[in-house]
Image (cartoon, grey):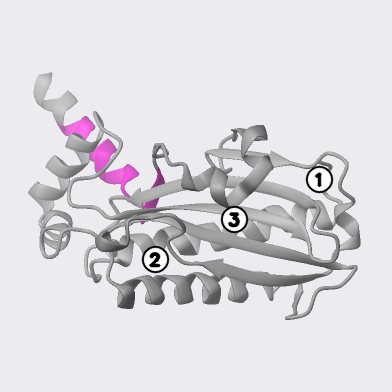
């Protein structure tokens, strides 16, 4: 009986390991409020599928916006010694490209403010690289993958995984009115396809997930499908 239960637990862990990134507990950082401003004081816990903490301006007229501007800020308030300038630039540029790819599917991306232009601003607050070599080994070897997944059940993170925390702010590009704000942290998960990647691959997977999430959530409001 114990053998059957043990096997079932292993299969459950392996079956659940299909994601490349997962939400993690936020770090206590003053950089969040430094970037979000007054909106920081209004953040509330998000629901499933949303950022860890978020705020939506209930009086905003979201349906008027059909264009977006994109601004990415690299490592706002973060300890610069943790990430080399080269990698900071790479992740910041990757964030911009990811946002541009997803938002351009639903909006016209512009570089000048205007009355129907919403300004999307994101800032990387912190980032952790995956442990070189060990991340790939722990994911690629079946026995280690099981142990890694089981070990993560009692913690927030998978061993050797990297991750990133970021803040998001949506404003009216013409008036500066804040329309929405959010902060979230994501870490590498247990998908096999995440094993063979460079040390910042977990952070990139998190950024991709955020870009998709930002575009989808924005469109829910600007299309009128969801009310603030």
Image point 86% across, 47% down: which residue?
A: 60
In the visual, does 95 lie left or right of 227?
Answer: left
The Cα atoms of the two marked residues, 3 and 1, are separated by 15 Å
Q: Nearer the viewer, residue 164 or 88?
A: 88
Residue 24: where, in percent of width, then height? 39, 41
Q: Which mark is residue 204?
A: 2
Residue 141: where, in percent of width, then height? 10, 57
Earlier-in-chain disc, 2 versus 3? 2
Earlier-in-chain disc, 1 versus 2? 2
Q: Secondary structure at mark 1?
A: loop
Q: Which mark is residue 88?
A: none
Image point 32% across, 62% down: which residue?
A: 80
Q: Which residue is mark 1?
A: 226
In the visual, does 67 lie left or right of 79?
Answer: right
Q: Which residue is mark 3?
A: 213
In the visual, does 116 lie left or right of 217?
Answer: right
Judged by depth in the image, the label closer to the viewer, 1 or 2, is 2
Q: Nearer the viewer, residue 36 or 59?
A: 36
- Outermost residue to the top: 1
Residue 208: where, in percent of width, then height? 48, 64
Question: What range is drawn magenta here?
Answer: 7-23
Q: Quadrant of the N terminus?
A: top left
**Which image quadrant for residue 163?**
bottom left
Image point 22% across, 31% down: which residue?
A: 9
Q: Secondary structure at mark 3?
A: helix
């Amino acid at each position: 009986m114990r053998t059957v239960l043990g096997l079932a637990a292993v299969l459950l862990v392996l079956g659940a390991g299909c994601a490349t990134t997962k939400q993690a507990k936020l770090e206590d950082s003053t950089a969040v409020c430094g970037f979000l401003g007054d909106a920081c004081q209004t953040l509330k816990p998000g629901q499933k599928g949303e950022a860890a903490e978020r705020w939506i301006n209930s009086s905003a007229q979201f349906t008027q916006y059909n264009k977006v501007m994109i601004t990415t800020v690299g490592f706002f308030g973060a300890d610069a010694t943790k990430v080399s300038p080269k990698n900071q630039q790479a992740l910041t540029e990757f964030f911009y490209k990811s946002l541009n790819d997803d938002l351009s599917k639903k909006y016209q991306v512009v570089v000048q403010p205007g009355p129907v232009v919403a300004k999307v601003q994101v800032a990387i607050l912190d980032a952790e690289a995956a442990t070189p070599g060990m991340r790939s080994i722990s994911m690629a070897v079946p026995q280690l993958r099981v142990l890694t997944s089981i070990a993560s059940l009692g913690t927030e993170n998978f061993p050797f995984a990297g991750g990133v925390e970021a803040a998001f702010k949506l404003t009216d590009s013409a008036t500066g009115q804040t329309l929405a704000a959010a902060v979230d942290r994501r870490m590498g998960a247990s998908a096999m396809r995440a094993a063979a990647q460079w040390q910042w691959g977990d952070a990139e997977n998190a950024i991709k997930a955020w870009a998709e999430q930002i575009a989808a959530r924005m469109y829910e409001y600007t299309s009128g499908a969801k009310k603030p």
